[in-house]
Image: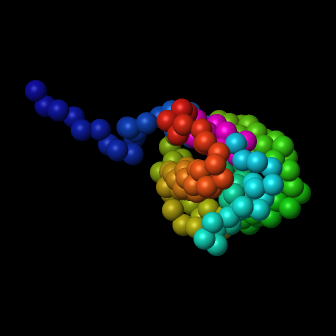
Amino acid sequence: METMIPNPTTAPVISSQDLLKHWQAHRGLTRRVIDAFPEKELFEFSIGGMRPFSKMVYELLAIAAPGVKEIATGTSEELKEDLSQATTKDKILALWDEATAAIDQYWALIPDEKFQEKIMAFGQYEGTVISSVLYYIDNEIHHRGQGYVYLRALGVEPPNFWER
């Protein structure tokens, strides 16, 4: 009996819907990390010259939903990390929730075959759609890890990372 080996570009290991579900689970955990911060420390606390966690969250907000929108629509915008209007934890959480909904909305417009296409994310980062999405997820996990360090340094027990 002959075994057929599927083409890796047409037989994904994970479906796009499962990838979205995985990412949204990470986003839920990151939201709980944001919420665990005391208000003042979210905007002011830092260790070793790193940015306050609020600034890291601004970066995540600047990348995730706008990046998925760019993939879905083909319209490239400049990366904008200035969220100076987000001066409270409640406002950041509201923006996080809006971004989460936008990711779902635009993700639904991305056909599976598009994930292998080459793109120039934000007009400057060359890769494929899938490599860009994986970067968005990896970047969130990286910054969330920094948030965990901050919370522990503040004496705050962070959410369990495995509870996604």
| Residue 20, horizontal then vertical, whole percent | 57, 37
Residue 70 visible to an observer of this rendering = no
Where is 75 relative to 23, above or below? Answer: below
The verdict on residue 86 being magenta is: no
Magenta span: predominant SS is helix
Outermost residue toward the top in this view: 1
Where is 47 relative to 137, above or below? Answer: below
Name the residue nearer the viewer: 20 or 54: 54
Residue ID at (34%, 44%): 8
| Residue 46, horizontal then vertical, whole percent | 68, 64
**Residue range of the region highlighted in magenta in the rendering:** 25-35
All told, the count of numbered labels is 0
64 sits to left or right of 131: right
The verdict on residue 29 being magenta is: yes
Outermost residue toward the front in this view: 155
Outermost residue toward the left in this view: 1
State which quarter of the image contains the C terminus: top right
State which quarter of the image contains the N terminus: top left
- Please tell me in which quadrant of the rendered image residue 108 appears: top right
Residue ID at (74%, 37%): 101
| Residue 15, horizontal then vertical, whole percent | 47, 34
Residue ID at (40%, 39%): 12
Name the residue nearer the viewer: 98 or 129: 98
| Residue 70, horizontal then vertical, whole percent | 68, 54
Residue ID at (63%, 66%): 47
Q: Which color scheme does this rendered protein use? A: rainbow
Where is 139 relative to 158, above or below? Answer: below
Residue 6 visible to an observer of this rendering = yes
